[in-house]
Image (spheres, rainbow, N blue to C red):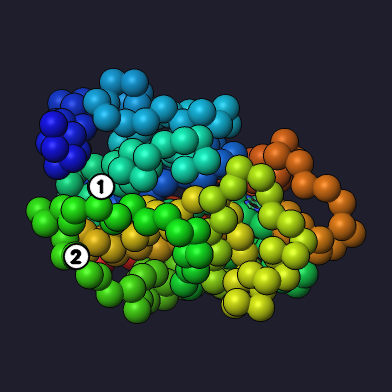
Amino acid sequence: MTEIARIDAAVDAIDAAAAGLRPRLGIVLGSGLDACADALTNAVDVSYADIPGFPRPAVDSHAGQLRLGTLGDVPVAMLRGRAHAYEGHHMLDVVRPVRTLARLGCTSVVLTNAAGSLRETVGPGRLMMITDHINWSGLNPLTGPNLDALGARFIDMTAAYDPTLRDHLCSAAGRIGLDLAEGVYFWYPGPNFETPAEIRAFRSLGADAVGMSTVPECIALRHMGVRVAGISTITNLAAGLGDGSALDHDEVMATGAAMADHLARLLSAFAREAADVL
Ligand code: HPA
């Protein structure tokens, strides 16, 4: 089976469950942010187990469910749980769910994640709008024969995080009184957290936050011409910063979960602000 046929089989399975809803906005929820799905109304859930070709996320904080519904007046498809490279998934599996959202009709996708901050002034509990990213992983979801049906071989990444969507995110944050930081996201594929020396190196390269996801999806979506926005929930100061204490996955998850409410408010305000361009 070709990759395009795999994606289209997933689209067909979702279409059959969608009760006529045609999502225009996709949202990918990062680790610990599952509660954001409560913001959708008229929700229909489809388990990843019922969507052919969808990888099962192994991180237990992830639901592994697609939720269709509306956010404000905008029809939305929300991925609750993603597959990560560190689980051993092939890059094609990692990006198949977002490619499926694009083939379903989503012309914009908001990618969210949990991230460590490289700036002491942007600490745990803050939300950071991603302005750009750095991919130094050596991995790329577009490696291999180009999928011509999806996009071109060589793609521009000058404005990978869409300026118009970013403007709407900023005004949505202003409207709800949320202090939204901005910065560059560095993809570190994990699964170990970084060493302090790596964090110092990433900082000198221009990174503001570091995390283990989002970049492959952004690249795959830009390949398809989909507009991308990104939001990091800052769950911790990166390794070696702050008081230098050890990083702990459970603590990171707990901080992220406590921020799900803020993120849900921002996403709802964004859907209202940006409705005309979505
Ligand atoms: N590093 C990488 N990924 C993360 C971090 C971090 O400090 N925090 C949450 N996800």
Residue 197 in sight in this render: yes
First in residue order: circle 2 vs circle 1 = 1
Q: Is residue 92 above or below residue 217?
A: above
In the rendered view of the protein, which quadrant contains the N terminus?
Answer: top left
Q: Decide which of 156, 233 is in the foreground and name it.
A: 156
In the rendered view of the protein, which quadrant contains the C terminus?
Answer: bottom left
Secondary structure of the residue carrying numbered label 2: loop
Secondary structure of the residue carrying numbered label 1: helix
Q: Identify which residue is drawn at 34% across, 60% down.
A: 219
Of badges 2 and 1, the one in the foreground is: 2
Q: Is residue 147 left or right of residue 234?
A: left
Q: Is residue 13 above or below residue 176?
A: above
Q: Residue furthest left?
A: 149
Q: Which mark is residue 99?
A: 1
Q: Is residue 180 above or below residue 107?
A: below
Crowd rating for badge 1 (residues with CA inside 10 Å; few <14, some 14–19, many 20+): many
Q: Which residue is mark 2?
A: 153
Q: Decide which of 53, 178 is in the foreground and name it.
A: 53
Q: Quadrant of residue 97?
A: top left
Crowd rating for badge 2 (residues with CA inside 10 Å; few <14, some 14–19, many 20+): few
Q: Decide which of 70, 145 is in the foreground and name it.
A: 145
Q: Position of residue 21 (x, y in %)?
A: 19, 38
Q: Residue furthest right?
A: 243
Q: Position of residue 191 (x, y in %)?
A: 61, 43
Q: Identify which residue is drawn at 35% across, 26% down.
A: 48
Q: Identify which residue is drawn at 42% across, 72% down.
A: 166
